[in-house]
Image (cartoon, rainbow, N blue to C red):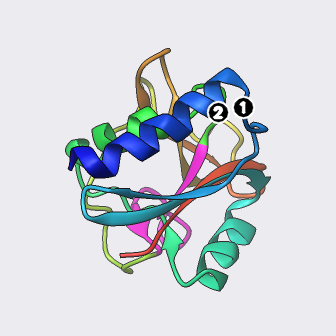
């Protein structure tokens, strides 16, 4: 596992130190899964299509452990679209990747709150400097995204 994480940590440190532009995109191999983190902002539908075009789907977080494995690679100034939404039935959060109820929900305090009146999609946002949690948001908002491939 160390041999997989070391190159990823080197890339992340390079991003933080400015060796690459902040919108650099890369595929990460973490915990036996492949992820593509894009800092290009898209609405939820565009992000879904971009992941599909690459042969994947928006991130379908399955556990706190998976979130913790990804956290070192998430930029604290960005939010990221997840595959989760309640477009079919309000309040029933389903993964677009599987068509099933979301296996893991880790809401930020006070969420979901439908603050825009049409918050039907879910983002992973930096609720504190070191924690990423879930927030409901209008699917039309422009947010970075994470694709998952396996």
Which one is in front, 16 or 2?
2
Element type at mark 1: loop
Q: Picture coordinates of residue 96 (x, y %)?
A: 47, 74
Looking at this view, name the residue that lies furthest to the top: 129
Q: Is residue 32 above or below residue 68?
A: below
Contact between labelled residues 2 and 1, with CB atoms less than 8 Å apart: yes
Horizontal side of 70 relative to 50 (left or right) equals left
Q: Picture coordinates of residue 73 (x, y %)?
A: 48, 39
Residue 19, disc: 1
Q: Residue at x 76, y 45 (%)?
A: 23
Magenta residues span 80-96
Q: To which residue does mark 2 refer?
A: 15
Q: Is residue 12 above or below residue 84?
A: above
Q: Residue at x 77, y 52 (%)?
A: 40
Report which quarter residue 51 is drawn in.
bottom right
Q: Is residue 104 above or below residue 98?
A: above
Measure how far apart labels 1 and 2 are at the Cα level: 6 Å
């Amino acid at each position: 596992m160390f041999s997989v994480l070391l190159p990823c940590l080197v890339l992340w440190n390079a991003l933080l130190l400015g060796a690459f532009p902040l919108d650099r995109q890369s595929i990460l191999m973490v915990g036996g899964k492949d992820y593509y983190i894009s800092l290009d902002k898209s609405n939820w539908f565009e992000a879904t299509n971009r992941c599909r075009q690459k042969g994947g789907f928006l991130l379908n977080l399955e556990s706190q452990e998976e979130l913790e494995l990804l956290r070192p690679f998430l930029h604290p100034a960005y939010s990221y679209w997840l595959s989760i939404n309640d477009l079919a039935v309000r309040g029933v959060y389903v993964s677009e990747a599987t068509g099933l109820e979301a296996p893991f929900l880790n809401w930020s305090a006070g969420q979901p709150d439908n603050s825009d009146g049409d918050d039907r999609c879910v983002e992973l946002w930096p609720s504190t400097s070191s924690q990423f949690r879930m927030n409901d948001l209008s699917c039309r908002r422009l947010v970075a995204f994470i694709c998952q491939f396996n």
